[in-house]
Image (tube, rainbow, N blue to C red):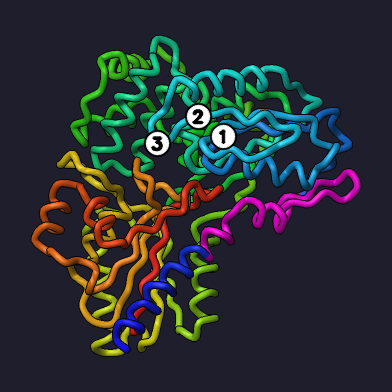
């Protein structure tokens, strides 16, 4: 009976997470948020008269970009002339050209695909309505090295930043100032076209300037900010990168466009899905199963292994005292944790979160920690489901955690959640099933 109950808790944790994936999928979101009635295009609570424009195109990138493009084709039909999106998760489209890229580290094919996007951007004018699709993953999938920089420079810098423990805001401050497209520079390229940016947020707090490194929004960060990130985290980058940033900080290179730049006069931004979209769906599934749900936060961040201990402590408190909820209950959280890499193993933030939790869990609790894009770090797993019985060798598990090698341990325990690319990306999702 105990084993059956444990299995049911693990199954529910997984089901809640997968409900979040489905709710945040572009096919679901676009169907709810975008509609064409006659010549009037509704995006959320805003309306655009398509009859004011000769051409409507889709341009953009990210993990979910092609899925958004396919959904927009369904809505717009013949009103959509075409476009270009760059992604690592291609969907079938009839009008929009889907080009390949790579994530989380930029690639040669990503550079070539982004060049095709730039050429399409250069072809628009004031009679064009651009639906700019920006989703999580666009920072890596849209590599456009600034003058004097190479793809190798960007790759080395991205690797070093992702291993440093820097937040996504800090990582993207550097990326924006090494790019010819990010930090509002795509908007400058598209002007004077009318631009409606459709956003799927994978950033804690949904800062538009950070999502996909903000290619169509004003950038509040500076070259000096980018240099400070490298110095604060002692990030070793190619000399070309540091020299480029230093010249920018000295005023020898143009800053990314700010809020008063005329490039943004005909740009609007519409956030269609966020981490809250997935969290709310997970809560709904828990409620359907008869569990009292609680949203802990959609803004959990920090070192993954430490954040996991806080989640375990909440489960312990619920079992011991009935606070903050009496079991049976489900605690859901979102956000984005980071990993400071000290070893050379295989893993990602959600796998480290799950492994750290598995070392602490005791009693009637199961935890699922996943990345909603289906790819945790550079692994083929979305994350893992664990409970107190997951680990057979705790000493080996602790060693694996020290070496950033969570994947093999959780794989051996048959704890991995493997979905493949999910078609969306709205940050991390964690489900704690108690009692």
**Residue 312 location in percent, x, y?**
25, 72
Residue at figure coordinates x 34%, y 15% from the top left: 244
Which secondary structure, mark 3? loop
- Nearer-the-camera pick, 57 or 190: 57
Q: Which residues are magenta?
A: 19-46
211 sits to left or right of 309: right
Tell me, yes or no, if residue 403 can be seen here: yes
Q: Nearer the viewer, residue 79 or 376?
A: 376
Q: Which residue is mark 1?
A: 61
Disc number placed over residue 104 in the picture, else none: 3
Which label's residue is closer to the chain start, 2 or 1? Answer: 1
Instruction: Report if the CB atoms under discs 2 and 1 are less than 8 Å apart.
Output: yes
In the image, residue 127 above or below residue 303: above
Left or right, 6 with reference to 424:
left
- Residue 101 has which mark? 2
Q: Quadrant of the N terminus?
A: bottom left
Q: Position of residue 74 (x, y in %)?
A: 77, 46
Picture quarter containing residue 334?
bottom left
In the displayed structure, 62 sits above or below 41; it is above
> Tag count in the figure?
3
């Amino acid at each position: 009976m105990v084993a059956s109950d444990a299995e049911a808790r693990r199954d529910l944790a997984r089901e809640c997470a997968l409900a979040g994936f489905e709710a945040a999928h572009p096919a679901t979101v676009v169907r709810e948020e975008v509609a064409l009635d006659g010549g009037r295009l509704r995006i959320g609570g805003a309306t655009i008269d398509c009859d004011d424009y000769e051409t409507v195109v889709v341009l953009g990138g990210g993990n979910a970009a092609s899925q958004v493009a396919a959904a927009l084709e369904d809505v717009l039909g013949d009103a959509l002339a075409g476009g270009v999106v760059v992604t690592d998760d291609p969907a079938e489209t009839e009008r929009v050209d889907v080009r390949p890229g790579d994530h989380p580290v930029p690639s040669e094919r990503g550079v070539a695909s982004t060049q095709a996007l730039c050429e399409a951007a250069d072809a628009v004018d004031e009679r064009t309505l651009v639906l700019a699709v920006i989703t999580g993953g666009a920072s890596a999938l849209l590599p456009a090295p600034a003058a004097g920089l190479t793809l190798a420079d960007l790759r080395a810098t991205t690797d070093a930043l992702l291993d440093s423990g820097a937040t996504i805001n800090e990582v993207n401050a550097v990326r924006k100032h090494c790019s010819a497209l990010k930090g509002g520079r795509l908007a400058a390229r598209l002007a004077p076209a009318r631009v409606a940016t459709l956003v799927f947020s994978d950033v804690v707090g949904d800062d538009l300037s950070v999502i996909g490194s903000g290619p169509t929004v004003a950038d509040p960060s500076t070259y000096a900010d980018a240099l400070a990130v490298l110095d604060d985290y002692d990030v070793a980058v190619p000399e070309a990168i540091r020299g480029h940033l230093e010249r920018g900080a000295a005023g020898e290179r143009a800053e990314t466009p700010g809020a008063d730049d005329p490039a943004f006069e005909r740009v609007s931004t519409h956030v269609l899905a966020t981490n809250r979209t997935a969290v709310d769906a997970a809560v709904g599934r828990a409620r359907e199963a008869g569990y009292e749900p609680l949203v802990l936060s959609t803004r959990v961040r920090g070192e993954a292994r430490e954040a996991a201990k806080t989640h375990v402590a909440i489960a312990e408190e619920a079992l011991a005292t009935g606070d903050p909820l009496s079991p049976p209950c489900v605690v859901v959280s979102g956000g984005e944790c980071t990993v400071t890499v000290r070893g050379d193993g295989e893993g990602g933030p959600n796998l480290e979160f799950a492994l750290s939790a598995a070392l602490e869990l005791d009693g009637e609790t199961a935890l699922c920690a996943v990345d909603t894009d289906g790819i945790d770090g550079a692994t083929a797993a979305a994350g893992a489901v664990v409970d107190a019985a997951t680990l057979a060798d705790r000493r080996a598990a602790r060693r694996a955690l020290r070496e950033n090698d969570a994947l093999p341990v959780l794989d051996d325990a048959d704890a991995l959640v493997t979905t493949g690319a999910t078609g969306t990306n709205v940050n991390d999702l964690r489900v704690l099933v108690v009692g």
